[in-house]
Image (tube, rainbow, N blue to C red):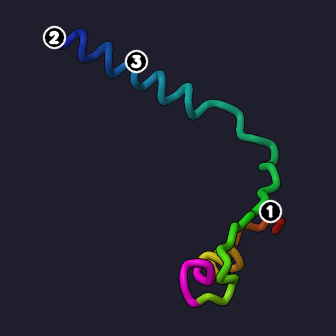
Amino acid sequence: MKKSLKLMAVVASLTLITGVAVAPASQAAKIKLCLALDTGGVDDRSFNQGAWAGAQASTVSNAEYL
């Protein structure tokens, strides 16, 4: 029982170390934001307006509006 527990701990540790050791991405791809609105438009005082405000308030620096 103790041997299998130690073996599982070693395997889990090696898995975590391997997962952390990968090289980071050089540069993230540019994000494209798209928002599908209903017939009410952007100023409908409901879901569309809230979603539009959230899209505009997005702090992602590499985002582009479509």
In front of the other: 27 or 30: 30
Give percent across and percent down for residue 33: 75, 63
Magenta-drawn stretch contains 49: yes
* CA neighbours of label 3 inside 10 A, class few (<14), some (14 to 19), many (20+): few
Give percent across and percent down for residue 12: 39, 24
Identity of the residue drawn at 61% across and 88% down: 44
* Chain-order first, disc 1 or disc 2: 2
Q: In the rendered image, which residue does mark 3 sit on?
A: 11
* Chain-order first, disc 3 or disc 1: 3
* CA neighbours of label 1 inside 10 A, class few (<14), some (14 to 19), many (20+): few
Identity of the residue drawn at 57% across and 90% down: 45
Of circles 3 and 1, the one toward us is 1
Distance CA(mark 3)–CA(mark 2): 15 Å
Identity of the residue drawn at 16% across and 11% down: 1
SS of the residue at dot 2? loop
Magenta span: 45-50
SS of the residue at dot 3? helix
Check the image and report above or below for 47 versus 19: below
Residue 11 lies in quadrant: top left
Q: In the rendered image, which residue does mark 1 sit on?
A: 62
Looking at the rendered structure, which numbered label has been put on residue 1? Answer: 2
